[in-house]
Amino acid sequence: MKTLFSVTGPYKVPVYEGKANRTITEEQGKRFWQKYGSVGEGRGCYVFGIRAGQGLTPGYGKATKSFKQELFTPHKLAKYQQMLADYRKGTPVLFFLVAPSKKGKPNARHVGQLEDFLIQNAVIVNEDLLNVRGTKQQEWGVGGVVRGGKGKQSKSAQHFRKMMKLRDG
């Protein structure tokens, strides 16, 4: 049976603004849940990113427990801090891909498949993705379609991308 995840976000993550830098602490995590507490009980996957200018860059994501249990642990805060250190400007944000609410845990296999899919797509957009598992780039590509390097696309590649509804990464 198909598991249909719903996506919510982006949710702005509060930051502590210091004199020399900014950080996300457990206190900012508490403030986040005070504002967006309803999403905290969900399960599925999440993606932490930075919104800068007109774009969004994925940085890290995963979840096996409820979002509230998982998001602002010391290990995750260290990952977010590492990403913030690479951006002078930009707003940290979170997206949630929520499994349908049923009794018990969501289908772990489907959550794992979604996580793998998200990581493979995110690493194409951000080569510095902070996830460790699943970030090894595939060793194949299709010229002008996927992982084909730079350069002008052939007409055939353009038509194929259109047929497959593939967008530029």
Image (cartoon, rainbow, N blue to C red):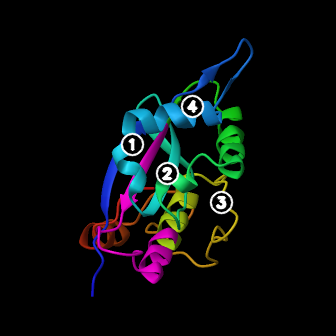
The residue under label 4 is: 28
Q: Say whether marks 2 and 1 touch (CB < 8 Å).
A: yes
The residue under label 1 is: 37
Alpha-carbon distance for marks 1 and 4?
Answer: 13 Å
Query: In the structure shown, which secondary structural element does the residue marked by tag 2 occupy?
Result: helix
The amino acid type of the residue labelled 2 equals Lys
Query: In the structure shown, which secondary structural element does the residue marked by tag 1 occupy?
Result: helix
Alpha-carbon distance for marks 4 and 3?
Answer: 22 Å
Point out the tag, 2 or 1, that comes first from the N-terminus: 1
Point out the tag, 3 or 1, that comes first from the N-terminus: 1
Query: In the structure shown, which secondary structural element does the residue marked by tag 4 occupy?
Result: helix
The amino acid type of the residue labelled 4 equals Gln
Point out the tag, 1 or 4, that comes first from the N-terminus: 4
Question: Within the magenta stretch, is there residue 95?
Answer: yes
* Residue 140 location (% of width, % of height): 59, 79
Q: Quadrant of the N terminus?
A: bottom left
The amino acid type of the residue labelled 3 equals Asn
Point out the tag, 4 or 3, that comes first from the N-terminus: 4
Q: Measuring 60% from the left and 31% from the top, which residue is drawn there?
A: 27
